[in-house]
Image (spheres, grey):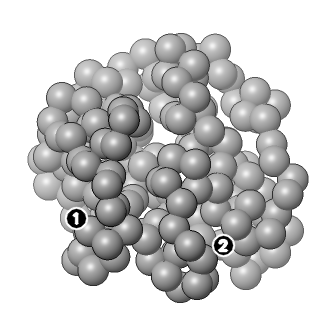
Amino acid sequence: MNLQAAITRINAIHWESVGTSSSEIEADLAREYLRRLALFFRDTSTRPLPPFIANVANILGDEQEIEISKYCNVEAMGTHGSNVYVYKVFEYYLQLAKLADLDHGYVDYILIYEPLIKIFEREGLVVLKPRELNVVGCAHIPLNHWYDKFIDMEPLDLNNLEE
């Protein structure tokens, strides 16, 4: 059920429009992703990894990596699917959803990826650059010492996003 919901969300993204919308909301969503990832590392007593290579399912012990092309229309992702970091984060999201289907104890971890998925659903785009996360058209978020910067950040209420 979690995997199917994740597949449906990814396939429903208007990939041809990704990157056409940018606002402070997308920047806030990117920061919220970093905050949630930092909390995951703290709560699991795991040494923080760089945000775009942090495979939550793998860190939780799942070694069954998946290929996104078996589940989603990678061609529809266009050039965004060829961006290795975007591609991998969506793979990590699917892998975690699949793990949560096998063990419901992992369901809450899926929420780590929620802000990042919302950016793409809102037709925003994030690009990893050397030592920064670029929210295209609105923000450059430095990633040096990212864990320390985001661990104590106030949470963003995803249900009350204002334009």
Q: State how many labels appear.
A: 2
* Disc 1 versus disc 2: nearer the observer: 2
In this view, 4 is above or below 15: below
Marks 1 and 2 sit apart, C-alpha to C-alpha, by 22 Å
| Label ID, residue 107 | 2
Image position, residue 73 (x, y; %):
68, 23
Image position, residue 72 (x, y; %):
70, 30
Tell me which corner region of the image, top left, top right, bottom left or bottom right, holds residue 155: bottom left
Q: Residue at x 57, y 23 (%)?
A: 81
Tell me which corner region of the image, top left, top right, bottom left or bottom right, holds residue 17: top left
At mark 2, the secondary structure is helix
Looking at the image, do the residues carrying marks 1 and 2 touch, with CB atoms under 8 Å apart?
Answer: no
Q: Amino acid at mark 2?
A: Val
In this view, 88 is above or below 50: above
At mark 1, the secondary structure is helix
Q: Residue at x 43, y 16 (%)?
A: 16
In this view, 48 is above or below 95: below
In the displayed structure, does residue 112 sit left or right of residue 87?
left
Classed neighbour count for the residue bearing mark 2: other residues with Cα under 10 Å, few (<14), some (14–19), many (≥20): some
Q: Is residue 41 visible?
A: yes
Q: Amino acid at mark 1?
A: Asn
Q: Residue at x 20, y 33 (%)?
A: 22
| Label ID, residue 123 | none
Give the labeled residue for mark 1: 160
Quadrant occupied by the N terminus: bottom right
Q: Earlier in the sequence, mark 1 or mark 2?
A: 2
Classed neighbour count for the residue bearing mark 1: other residues with Cα under 10 Å, few (<14), some (14–19), many (≥20): few
Q: Is residue 8 visible?
A: no
Image position, residue 157 (x, y; %):
27, 70
Image position, residue 55 (x, y; %):
64, 55
Q: Residue at x 58, y 84 (%)?
A: 45
